[in-house]
Image (tube, rainbow, N blue to C red):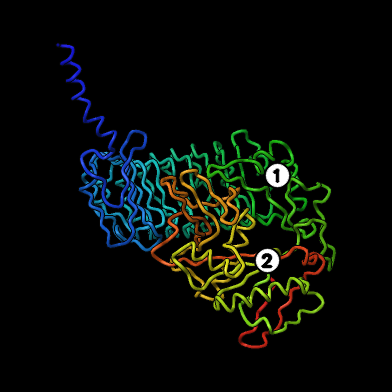
């Protein structure tokens, strides 16, 4: 009898715990629009807000949550918590991670910061923050991770991170940062990851990273560096250095010496205009060793992407050739006077851009045209179809394909796809970094030509889908798994069961989300040009600009 009482008492004592674990709700029902679950045995609440009229009732959220995420279902139009982050967190003493993206936040008042003083991770990316002074970071001294990407920061001044001595991750990518104080990161002794990608930096101040003794991962890609920053050579524990998409033309012997360090695991340099002359002999020789190839050409990055090996930009006879395929005897070659030939299939090229007009207007390009009549006929036919269906759209062509940039968006990915297919096209599919760079270059040019092609949502539908359940990105036309992705920070969304659609953001990265939004997205169609009708563009590359015959005539430009 006594044993039975003990068993019953024990069951009664653990029943509330069992009920808590099974339901995942604790004392309250999960708020409308939110999902309540567990992460590593701690309570998490994730809310997706559809519009500014929906207000989350924080009294419906358990006070013992550890993780809170508030995200809009559409980008850039929700300001439920902006511009000042409200002081609604007093009832959550265990809150460790707060994610509030795309909510128009510009500042965090000190009262709110005091309620968040136990935070270890804060993500306020994709908001409207233009200054760090208004974030009350001196109160949030317990932070170990701070994500500020995709805001409007222009500089980092001395002392702005002074109290964040525990910080291990700092994300500052996709801002507009042009300058850094030499003492900007002085007190960040525990910093392991620093992401400065996608800014406007030209150099790093002397000594700026000298006190970051634990820094391992440094992303400087997508800036305006013309040479490898000397300051990176002082970081002894560095394991990953990303320098893609800059303006770097050469790699000196002293840089190569540092990159041979056993601690350095990966250094990426793709999409830089490397001048392949004798100044890069040591670099090319090293890349062609097993160690150099592993670090520069074959290293996997944290985001799952493998950057390609850097290629030559000049001289023209070597343009497009990956440095690991160079013959050292070729270094120091120069183009012959007046010569345009190249022995490498990737050399040459350029873009042909069109404004939609009347294709019946005949254009005379002369004997040096880079396209034969067959390919021109394809383009004329395409511009005619687009002109009739999408009058203000832009048609932009590269050597192998043409893109159509809409001037009137749609909320539905399916509608965008149908519009493309009605023209005999498909939504654009991006298969590698070169296509990503090409598409963004032509998109920017198209929007500059006609402001109606800009997207109020800052997104363009493209031909990819994402499955959270399978965690796979696939091409819409074939269904095959995409070998290349370019996700924005924090994407893709790993929560959910239904397939999502992919949009290209104006910052060049990808976002996943619902296939129907509450605001129009523009979209990009594409079509391939018939390869059997192309001439060898390497032997005839004289630019031509035919005169416009009327207000509706087509306008051609070769973009070198």
Q: Is residue 494 left or right of residue 94?
A: right
Residue on which disc 2 sits: 398
Q: Residue furthest bottom?
A: 550
434, 164: nearer the viewer: 434
Q: Which mark is residue 253?
A: 1
Q: Which mark is residue 379?
A: none
Query: Which SS class for mark 2?
Result: loop
x, y (%) of residue 211?
47, 41
10 Å crowding of disc 1: few (<14), some (14-19), many (20+): some
Distance from Cα at disc 2 to Cα at disc 1: 36 Å
Horizontal side of 551 relative to 371 (left or right) equals left
| Residue drawn at the location 49% of the way across and 48% of the way down | 467
In the rendered image, which quarter contains the C terminus? bottom right
Give above or below for 89 relative to 503: above
Look at 27% across and 39% down and name the residue there.
94
Residue in the picture at 78% in, 48% down: 326
Q: Is residue 240 above or below residue 378?
A: above
| Number of disc labels | 2
Q: Residue at x 58, y 73 (%)?
A: 394
| Circle 1 SS class | helix
In this rendered view, identify the residue nearer to me: 398 or 87: 398
**Can residue 183 be seen in this snapshot?**
no
| Residues tagged 2 and 1 counted as in contact (Cβ below 8 A) | no
Is residue 108 or residue 71 the one in the foreground? Answer: 71
Q: Is residue 125 visible?
A: yes
Q: Position of residue 379 (x, y in %)?
A: 68, 73
Tell me where residue 297 appears, x and y as whole percent. 67, 43
Q: Is residue 297 left or right of residue 36?
A: right
């Amino acid at each position: 009898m006594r044993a039975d009482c003990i068993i019953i008492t024990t069951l009664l004592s653990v029943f509330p715990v069992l009920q808590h674990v099974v339901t995942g709700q604790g004392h309250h029902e999960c708020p409308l629009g939110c999902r309540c679950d567990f992460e590593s045995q701690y309570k998490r609440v994730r809310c997706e807000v559809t519009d500014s009229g929906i207000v989350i009732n924080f009294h419906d959220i358990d006070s013992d949550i550890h993780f809170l995420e508030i995200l809009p279902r559409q980008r850039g139009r929700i300001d439920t918590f902006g511009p000042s982050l409200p002081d609604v967190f007093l009832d959550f003493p265990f809150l460790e991670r707060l994610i509030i993206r795309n909510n128009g936040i510009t500042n965090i008042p000190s009262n709110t910061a005091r309620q968040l003083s136990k935070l270890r991770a804060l993500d306020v990316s994709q908001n409207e923050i233009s200054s760090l002074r208004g974030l009350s970071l001196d109160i949030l001294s317990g932070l170990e991770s701070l994500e500020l990407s995709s805001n409007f920061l222009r500089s980092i001044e001395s002392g702005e991170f002074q109290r964040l001595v525990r910080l291990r991750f700092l994300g500052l990518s996709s801002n507009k940062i042009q300058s850094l104080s030499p003492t900007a990161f002085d007190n960040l002794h525990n910093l392991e990851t620093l992401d400065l990608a996608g800014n406007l930096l030209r150099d790093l101040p002397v000594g700026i990273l000298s006190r970051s003794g634990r820094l391992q991962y440094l992303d400087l890609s997508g800036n305006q560096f013309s040479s490898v920053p000397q300051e990176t050579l002082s970081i002894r524990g560095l394991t990953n250095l990303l320098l893609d998409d800059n303006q770097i033309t050469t790699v000196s012997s002293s840089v190569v010496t540092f990159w041979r360090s056993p601690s350095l695991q990966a250094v990426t340099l793709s999409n830089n205009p490397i001048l392949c002359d004798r100044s890069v002999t040591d670099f090319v020789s090293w890349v062609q060793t097993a160690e150099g190839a592993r670090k520069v050409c074959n290293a996997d990055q944290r985001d799952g992407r493998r950057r390609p090996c850097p290629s030559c930009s000049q001289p023209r006879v070597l343009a497009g050739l990956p440095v690991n395929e160079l013959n050292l005897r070729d270094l120091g070659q120069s183009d012959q006077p007046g010569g345009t030939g190249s022995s490498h299939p990737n050399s040459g090229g350029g873009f042909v851009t069109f404004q939609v007009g009347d294709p019946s207007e005949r254009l005379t390009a002369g004997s040096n045209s880079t396209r034969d009549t067959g390919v021109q006929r394809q383009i004329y036919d395409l511009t005619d179809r687009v002109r009739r269906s999408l009058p203000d759209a832009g048609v932009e062509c590269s050597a192998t394909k043409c893109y159509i940039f809409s001037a009137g968006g749609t909320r539905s990915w399916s509608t965008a796809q149908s519009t493309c297919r009605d023209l005999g096209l498909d939504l654009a599919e991006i298969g590698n970094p070169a296509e990503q760079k090409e598409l963004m270059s032509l998109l920017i040019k198209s929007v500059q030509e006609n402001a109606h092609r800009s997207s109020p949502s800052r997104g363009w539908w493209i031909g990819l889908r994402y499955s959270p359940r399978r965690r796979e990105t696939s091409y819409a036309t074939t269904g095959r798994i995409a070998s290349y992705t370019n996700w924005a920070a924090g994407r893709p969304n790993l929560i959910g069961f239904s397939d999502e659609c992919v949009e290209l953001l104006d910052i060049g990265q990808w976002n996943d989300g619902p296939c129907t939004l509450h605001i129009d997205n523009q979209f990009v169609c594409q079509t391939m040009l018939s390869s059997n009708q192309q001439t060898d563009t390497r032997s005839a590359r004289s630019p031509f600009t035919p005169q416009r015959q009327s207000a509706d005539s087509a306008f051609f430009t070769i973009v070198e």
